[in-house]
Image: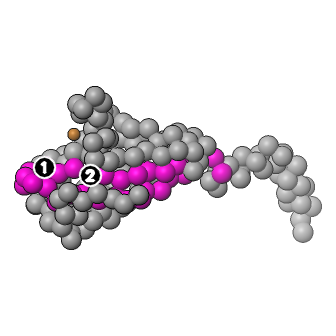
Amino acid sequence: MVPGLLAAALALTGCSSASDASDAAAHVGAKGPRLSVTGAYIPQPVMADMAAGYFTVTNTGDTDAELTSVSSDLAADITLHATAENRMRKVSSLTVPAGGRLTLSNGGNHLMLTELTHKPVAGDKVSMQLHFATADPIGVTVPVEPAGYRPKG
Ligand SMILES: [Cu+2]
């Protein structure tokens, strides 16, 4: 081995302190939001031009995540809606709390899909992409369920 290279290698090793090592561990996923999506469905809509979407996002990480938008080939426009006092309103994001979950469900938070490319029918599968402020997007295959379907549990 060339003496100069050995010295350089030793110097590099010397630079890597304990805190650098823990940072490295953090970057492989110990910190930040850790998200998974379950229970997604779209009820078969009554009208041909509008549909709702529901799912649960669970965050087992140590940082809140913000769901900022959802895209799909089913709808040209998808907005996030929150429901308060029986009135829904459009919101720019929904929080998935660290160690908690964000639930979109009938009568609560939901997706509003408009400008549909076709009318979804029970049995269809719709692909969706969930976009987050500080986490990678998540792709979900969402089943279309009969109107009036309610998830179990
Ligand atoms: Cu709505």
Check the image and tell me how it is coloured: one colour
In the rendered structure, which amino acid carries the disc numbered 1?
A: Met
User: Residue 27 at x, y = what percent?
Assistant: 64, 51
Q: Which secondary structure, mark 2?
A: strand
* Image spot of residue 43 (x, y percent): 21, 57
Judge left or right: residue 27 versus residue 119: right
Callout 1: 10 Å neighbours few (<14), some, many (20+)?
A: some
Q: Residue furthest top?
A: 85
Which residue appears farthest toward the front when viewing the image?
153
Question: Which image quadrant is residue 132 in?
Answer: top left
Q: Is mark 2 within 8 Å of ligand 1?
A: no
Give the mark count.
2
Q: In what element is the residue under mark 1?
A: strand
- Work out whether residue 44 can be spotted: yes
Which residue corresponds to the image point at 72% horizontal and 46% vertical from the top-left?
23
Give the residues drawn in magenta, as a range: 30-59
Q: Is residue 137 above or below residue 94?
A: below
Residue beneath disc 1: 50
Asked whether mark 1 and ligand 1 are closer than 8 Å, the reply comes as no
Mark 2 lies on residue: 53
Q: Nearer the viewer, residue 129 or 17?
A: 129
Give neighbour class at mark 2: few <14, some 14-19, many 20+ (Cα, 10 Å): many
Q: Is residue 21 magenta?
A: no
The stretch drawn in magenta includes residue 41: yes
Per the model, the C-alpha gap separating discs 1 and 2 is 10 Å
Assign the C terminus to one quadrant of the image: bottom left
Ligand 1 lies in quarter: top left
Q: Amino acid at mark 2?
A: Gly
Per the picture, the main secondary structure of the magenta-coloured stretch is strand
In the rendered image, the vertical position of residue 37 relative to residue 97, given as above or below: below
> Can the viewer see residue 131?
no
> Which of the 4 image quadrants contains residue 10?
bottom right
